[in-house]
Image: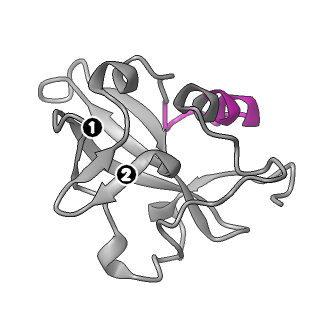
Amino acid sequence: MADETATLVRLGETDLTLANAAEDVRGLTVVDRNGDELGKVEGLLIDPDERRVRFLELGAGGFLGIGKKTLLVPVDAVAAVDDQVHIDKDREHVAAGPGYDPELKVQRDYFEDVYGYYGFSPYWLPGSIPPRYPFL
C-alpha cells in the first residue's frame, strides 16, 4: 500500500522511464467508448515510490491553447491502446470531470474525487487492484 504522504509527479519531470517504451502514450489521441476524440495525452502522473503510472494528463478542447481544459483520467479507465488511447467512458462524462491545473499542487482528496468520479477505488485503499498498464 502507498505511503499516506506519497505525491504523484509528472513522468517527464523525473529520471524514470517506462519499462516498455512502446507503452508511452504521451502525444496519442484519446477517444471515448464511441470512438469520439477527447484530446491528447499530454503527460503521465506517476507514483515514484511504487513506480506506477496512476493518471493520464488529458489536454482537451480549445483552439490554439484558448479554452483548453486539462483533465486527469485514471489509467484504470484505459480500455485499450493501439494508435489511440481508448477510454471506457463517453465524451460527456470525461468532459464533465474534475479539472486539473498542472501548475498547482493537489491534495490526496482531489485524486480520491477523480477516482470516485470514474468509478474506481483509489490505489492506496486496501483491496485496490492495480491496472495492467503501464509499469516504470
Q: Is residue 74 above or below residue 115?
A: below
Percent x, y of residue 59: 30, 37
Residue located beneath label 1 in the image:
33
Task: Please name the residue shown 52% across and 50% down the image.
Answer: 76
Q: Is residue 96 above or below residue 73?
A: above
Res 19 label: none
| Residue count near mark 2 (Cα–Cα under 10 Å), binned few <14, some 14–19, many ≥20 | some
Instruction: State the quadrant of the N terminus.
Output: bottom right
Helix, strand or loop at label 2? It is strand
Percent x, y of residue 39: 23, 37
Instruction: State the quadrant of the C terminus.
Output: bottom right
| Residue type at tag 2 | Ala
Mark 1 to mark 2 CA distance (whole Å) = 8 Å
Observer-nearest of 22 and 5:
22
Please tell me which of labels 1 and 2 falls first in the chain.
1
Residue located beneath label 2 in the image:
79
Task: Please name the residue shown 44% across and 63% down the image.
Answer: 12
Q: Is residue 14 left or right of residue 40?
A: right
Q: Report the magenta residues as a range.
A: 101-113
Residue 109 colored in magenta in the image: yes
Q: Disc 1 vs disc 2: Cβ atoms closer than 8 Å?
A: yes
Residue 11 colored in magenta in the image: no
